[in-house]
Structures are given as structure tokens and as C-alpha cells.
Image (cartoon, rainbow, N blue to C red):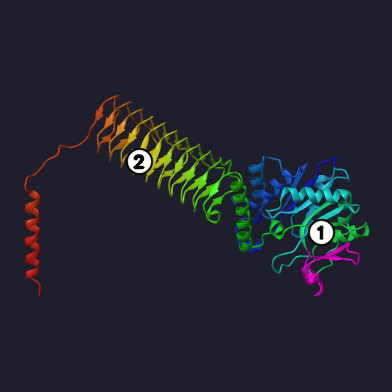
Amino acid sequence: MSQAPIVFIMAAGLGTRMKSDTAKVLHKIAGRPVLHWIVLAAKQAGAGRVVAILGHQNETVKASLDAAFGPGAVDIAIQPEQRGTGHAVQCALPAVEKESDDRIVAILAGDAPLLQSERIAQLVEACAANKAGLSLLSTVPDRDMPYGRLVRDREGLLEKIVEDVDATPEQKKIKDANASFYAVRLGHLRKDLQTLRADNKKGELYLTDLVAHAYKRGGATAIDAPWEEVSGINDRVDLSAVEAAARRRVNEHWMRAGVTMIDPKSTYIDADVGPLGKDVWLAPGVCLRGKTQIGDHVRVDTGCVLTDVTVAAHTQLKPYSVLTESQVGERAQIGPFSHLRPASRIDDDAHIGNFVETKKTHVMQGAKANHLAYLGDASIGSKANIGAGTITCNYDGVSKHKTTIEEGAFIGSDSQLVAPVTVGRGAYVGSGTTVTKDVPRGALALTRVKQVNVEGWADRFREAQAKRKKAGEGGEH
């Protein structure tokens, strides 16, 4: 083809059966809004322009498209009232008024996110080769669905599409159903749309009436497509079914790319995750979300949840660790039950252990915090050791303050570092210390009170308790 196709995406519907405050096309499939799947497929198919036909919550939907693809990357047409698919496309024509009649327009349903870019290209190629200038996708639903039926003449030419509500009992027996994806030459589209009439039970302008016009020119081309690929979303049940299919597709892609999944059915990888390196190992219950990236030979154990995280090669994430908007270096060990909150950076060979939480903290190479610590707004120097129960007290009730622990420092268990404060290189903080001022390099900081041992106290205490208990028992009746 000499010119790239134009793509119209019908996304103006109310989606009332979703019973949601969110527009149907913004519900997510594998972490990506439904409409974004269609736009991406259209672009991958070589679309010269993409026009989204919006109605319900159009400003919110447009903002979502601008954020994902860049301002103006997707043109917008508005269908102010819902008068059918034919009316929706009529509303989009002004956006292409300067385009020539020989341009091919692919018209796609905005609620069927699993359509492949290869299928769009196939649809466009079939239209280009068809004298009638129209091609469409047909499918056979796996259950009874209120889809339009493809009616053919005795020679097998596609004569018309009859909507389910208007179909006779005999026509409803036809298995071939309209999938609501088309490609049509713009000149034919302009002329045929003018002839549409709402003389049907719904009182709407049907885009499917274009098929009857194409029949007069020799007949449209129908291309069979798998039901799963073209299945639309009408309610939460459909949403769940499409979600399962999308996640299966995503998982199969990564397994073929060299990722091991112990149980793919319980492994959840968002569509925008990647790359995932070779020999990555994922245990059951792992969730990879957002734009997470994982290097070679990383092991992610049971129940870990990663959102917008970068993990470098040969790192091990132990069970039930949660990481968000953070970076983890090579050969690091995280978990079990660790929590890396946003802006955490864990460098090569560092250890973040069980029940350790970080937030906006840089843990440098080889440093360790293996047990029960909170490190917030902190810089932890290389090879520093953070004892169990350590807390960086970073918030004074109004502002956040930074704690700096320099290279090789040793922080004893149950210590509190009241920011802003610096522990110098190689310094020690004794167990149970509350640090309120800087600790010089190589120094020892202690705020421990003097221990007093009272000889024989424990024996005397137990004897007294035993006597009280006996006296109480004697007084009972």
C-alpha cells in the first residue's frame, strides 16, 4: 500500500453494565487500560493516524491517552450522544475531511483489547484487494451472544449483516457473527454513511449497513478471527475472561523468551513489564506490575510484588517482599518480608532482610540491614551494618530529615538515629543508643544508662508472689 491506513477506534459507549464510575475503556487488562491496547495494536500495524471516538468521560479518556502516547498522538472525535456505531463514525469524518478518497480506514471496537496488530494489517490488506472496498472480521462465539449474523447469498457472497435484535429465528442459527472490526475505503465510507437510516428496533444508525452497499459493488471480504482475540468487554465477567487470556498471552511470551515460571496460572505480569532477562525464575504468587524490569538470573520467590522496579542481574528476592518504584543492584538479597518503598536504591551485594523497610534510602554496596529495621530518608554507606531494631527517626511531625551512615559504620541493635544526623566512617553505635548528634569517624556512641544488679532480688520476688497466691487460695470458699 502506498499510504498508511487511518484507524478509527469506537470508544464512546457508556458501559453501563460495568456498573462502575470508571469509563469502560479505562478499565485495565494486565495493568494497561483497555483502550490503550487497541491504540498500541493500531500503531504497531502501521497506522498513519489514530482517531479515538469518545463520548462518556471524554476528557478523562483523552487525558489518559495523552499521558500514555504523548499529547496529540491520538486524534479525538466526540460522539455527543449515543446513536449507534454508524453515528459514531459519522462523528469522526470531520477529522479526516482533508484525506483522499482512496485512503483506507480501519474501524475498530474500543472494548476488545486482544486484537492483534497482524490482524489489523490483514484486514487492511484485504480491503485494498477487494473491489467493493470493504473487509471485516467474523468470528464464532463460544457461547450465545447478541452479535450480528453474517448473511450470505447462494453463491456465498456476503449479502448483509443482521443485528441480533432484528434477526429472524432462522438467521439467529447462523454461526458466523460480526466481530465489529472493519476496513473500508474512505470514499465509499463517506458516501455510504449518508444513506444510513435508523429504521430498526433500536432506532440507531448501524455501521453494519455498509455491508449491504458493498454487496452491490461485488461483496465485502470476511476474515475469520478467533473468538478470544475479538471478544469484547460488556461487564465484569467479560473483563475477567479477557484479563485471563491477556495474562496467559503475556506469560507465554516471557516463557518463550527464557523466563521460568513454576506456576504460570498464579504468576501475574503486567503488559508493560519488561525486559525480563534470561534465566529469570519466578515462583508462584509473584506479581510484576507497571514498568518493572528484571536482569538475568534473578530469582523472585513466592508472593513478591514488584511495581515499577528495576532489578539487576543475579539478585535474589526472597518470599513476600514488596518493592515499589525502587532500584536493586546486582547480587543483592532482599527479604523475606522486606518492604522497599518509593525512591529506595539498593546497590550491588547489599542485603535487606526480614521485616526491614526502606523509603527514599540509598543502601550502598555490601551494606546490610538483615533484621527488623526502618531506614527512611537515609544514606547507608558501603559495608555498613545495621543491627536489628534500628530506626532512622526521619520525621519531626512537620518535615523530613536525612540520616547519613558512612562507609563501614556499625549500628548496634535497638538504636534510634534522630535525624538530621551523621554517623562517621567506621564509627560504632552501641546497642540501645539514641543518637541525637553527629558521631565522629571511628568513634563509639553510647547513651546507655548504668546497669545495676540487685543480688537475690528475683528469688525474694518469687517467694513473695507464691505467698500471696497461697493466701488468696486459702480465702476462697
Q: Residue at x 39, y 38 (%)?
A: 351
- Let me know if residue 267 appears in the view: yes
* Amino acid type, mark 1: Leu
| Quadrant position of the C terminus in the picture | bottom left
From the viewer's perspective, is the residue at label 2 or at label 1 nearer? Answer: 2
- For marks 2 and 1, give the CA distance: 64 Å
Residue under numbered circle 2? 370
Q: Which region is colored magenta?
A: 149-176
In the picture, which quadrant includes the N terminus?
top right
Q: Is residue 352 left or right of residue 23?
A: left
Q: Is residue 323 left or right of residue 57?
A: left
On whether residue 169 falls in the magenta region, the answer is yes
Horizontal side of residue 409 vs 94, given as left or right? left
Q: Residue at x 60, y 60 (%)?
A: 240
Q: Along the line of sight, which residue is nearer the eye, 94 or 135?
A: 135
Q: Which mark is residue 10?
A: none
Going by the numbered disc 2, the residue's amino acid type is Asn
Q: Nearer the viewer, residue 363 or 302?
A: 302
**Where in the figure is residue 451, as x and y percent of width and height?**
14, 39
Q: Position of residue 154 (x, y in %)?
A: 91, 67
User: Residue 408 at what x, y percent from top left?
Assistant: 34, 28
Q: Nearer the viewer, residue 169 or 16?
A: 169
Q: Which residue is mark 1?
A: 207
The reply to whether the magenta stretch includes residue 294 is no
Secondary structure under tag 1 reads: helix
